[in-house]
Image (cartoon, rainbow, N blue to C red):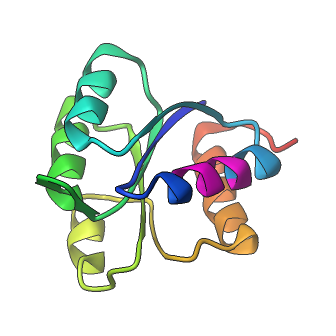
Amino acid sequence: MKAILIDKDERALVRLEKLIKSTSNIQVVGKFTDPFKARSFVVNEGIDMVFLETQLPGLNGIVLAKYLKDLNEDIEIVFTTNVKEYAIDAFNIDALDYIIKPVKKTRLRKTLERILERKSLFFK
């Protein structure tokens, strides 16, 4: 499975990528601090999942998630954020999960297990 990570904080992207790699076979094929570059990447590449911050420069993460779901209804969206207030909006667009930062390995593992069950893949 191919995933991209979108967050305004480069350090958060690096940390999340390390957690994903240590927990699953999911391939992180892109990390973005610019939501518009991320959106273009998804349009041109076959992406299975997006880990997404709700507060991004110039574009709300919920709006971006709706756009991505319109492009591909099967794309899995997982929000990783400090903000609790968008959780209902996230689930209304069929986000798989909404994780409050800091992302913990045990919490991420549960999310990844749900994704992989849906996609019939296996953990390392």
Q: Position of residue 119 (x, y in %)?
A: 59, 38
Residue most extreme to the right: 124
Q: Is residue 50 above or below residue 16?
A: above
Q: Is residue 121 left or right of residue 99?
A: right
User: Can I make out residue 76 in this image?
Assistant: yes
Q: Position of residue 54 (x, y in %)?
A: 28, 65
| Residue 72, image quadrant | top left
* Main secondary-structure element of the magenta-colored stretch: helix
Looking at this view, is 73 or 38 the one in front?
A: 38
Q: Quadrant of the N terminus?
A: top right
Q: How many marks?
A: 0
| Magenta highlight range | 13-19
Looking at this view, is 112 or 99 the one in front?
A: 99
Q: Position of residue 4 (x, y in %)?
A: 47, 37
Q: Position of residue 36 (x, y in %)?
A: 19, 36
Q: Is residue 18 magenta?
A: yes
Q: Is residue 3 above or below residue 56?
A: above
Q: Is residue 20 left or right of residue 69?
A: right
Q: Quadrant of the C terminus?
A: top right
| Residue 87, image quadrant | bottom left
Residue most extreme to the bottom: 84
Q: Is residue 66 left or right of residue 48?
A: left
Q: Is residue 94 magenta?
A: no
Which residue is at a point 20% across and 60% down the rendered structure image? 62
Which residue is at a point 60% across and 71% down the rendered structure image? 103
Which residue is at a point 25% across and 42% down the rendered structure image? 35
User: Can I make out residue 72 in this image?
Assistant: no
Q: Is residue 56 above or below residue 38?
A: below
Which residue is at a point 38% across and 38% down the rendered structure image? 75
Looking at this view, is 92 or 23 the one in front?
A: 23
